[in-house]
Image (spheres, rainbow, N blue to C red):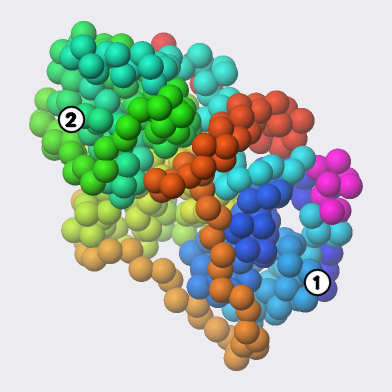
Amino acid sequence: MRRISPLDVRAALLSREEIALFDLRQEADYAVAHPLFAASLPLARVELEIADRVPRRTTPIVLYGGGDDAVEQAAERLANLCYKDIAALDGGLDGWRDSGGELFRDVNVPSKAFGELVEAWRRTPSISPEDLKARLDSKADLIVLDARRFEEYHTMSIPSSVSVPGAELVYRVSELAPRPETLVVVNCAGRTRSIIGAQSLVNAGIPNPVAALRNGTIGWTLAGFALEHGQTRRAPAAGAEALALASDRARRVAIKAGVTRIDGACLREWVADPLRTTYRFDVRTPEEFSAGHVRGFRSAPGGQLVQEADVFAPVRGARIVLADNDGVRADMTASWLAQMGWQVYVLEHALQTTELETGPWQPTPPARAVPIRTEAVPPPVPYKRPYEGTDNPVAAMQAYLDWEYGLVEQLARDGTHGFRPVFVS
């Protein structure tokens, strides 16, 4: 099969050409070492995921990992699903390293590295676990907002915190902290969503003091403090006044980041374009998506889309179109994706259309052109994330934080990221 050199892949990344680089190993192996923009796609999941992750059949796809046999199997399966431009990374992971390419650990690295760059460039305010604990004990005027998915919050959370997943923060903060004197603390499990969440509120210009909880629930645990479990506190619905204020704030941030809006006619033209990939994501909550969404859009709550951009949109150089019912969450999410180097747009009047569907998002089934081989492959082995769950070793949590602190330096060595955090005054 055709091979492509690591230098040519790097050139495509630098020039923002469309390219999807997939690591076919188990996720646990992928997390040990991979290029910055390589996405994990274990061989056993190729047919289950490829239609949504690479919707355009002529997108250049580059494969590596698992040995030549795995690459050949994946290439055959993709070809049988009508993908036309498939190549093997010459030399695989060793070839990438030998050509001078940087290798990164862990998962969702582009987003995590971007978060570290944002903190370094923007000096995102933060608060230590010890300081927060003392303020909570003294009943200080503050509120703690957990920016993770509700399921993660429900598993473990900072005492008194409220679940407000990332893209919901600007949308709902006025109802949660109506007094401008109230300190708003944003936390996640580690660092990225805390930083992005806190900086979102700063960018939006809310009058309150804002801080990210330094190192999230990991930092809280390492400081010797107890977490809560099984909590169900959620943010209330935004009232009309709060919604109008949030909409103005979010639009200003999106414009500053270079985000524009498109209409339905433009979107239909883009989706039909055989030369460009257009991802479509609905960034509201899964419950709102299920109640009614634009046909063809995938549910991707905004905070998680920013956190897991490599999972949702592995085709680097593609277009992204976001939708919600009021623009707030789409604008805020788009502002971050644009700063991460994406061409991102917001669909105007998204839900004012007859092309609506109900129900939860379902993966697009593979459309096979011909029968394919069905060799047995090992079931996926997920990577044990040191910031999820309640039984993580202290050493693993500390090592994870130490690694994350070094990501800005790694980005500089790699040189392909194209991130550009903007200053919103």
Q: Along the line of sight, which residue is nearer the eye, 156 or 67?
A: 156
Residue sitting at the far bottom: 371
Toward which corner of the image does residue 54 lie, by quadrant? bottom right
- Identified by mark 1, the residue type is Asp
Vertical order, 130 against 217 (above or below)? above
Residue sitting at the far top: 181
Name the residue beneath numbered marker 2.
243
- Residue 295 in the magenta stretch? The answer is no
Name the residue beneath numbered marker 1.
68
Please tell me which residue is depicted at 67% across the width and 65% down the height of the picture.
Answer: 24
Vertical order, 168 against 180 (above or below)? below
Residue sitting at the far right: 98
Residue 325 x, y percent position in the rendering = 23, 45
What element does badge 2 sit on? helix
For the residues marked 1 and 2, what is the alpha-carbon distance in whole angstroms?
A: 54 Å
- Identified by mark 2, the residue type is Leu
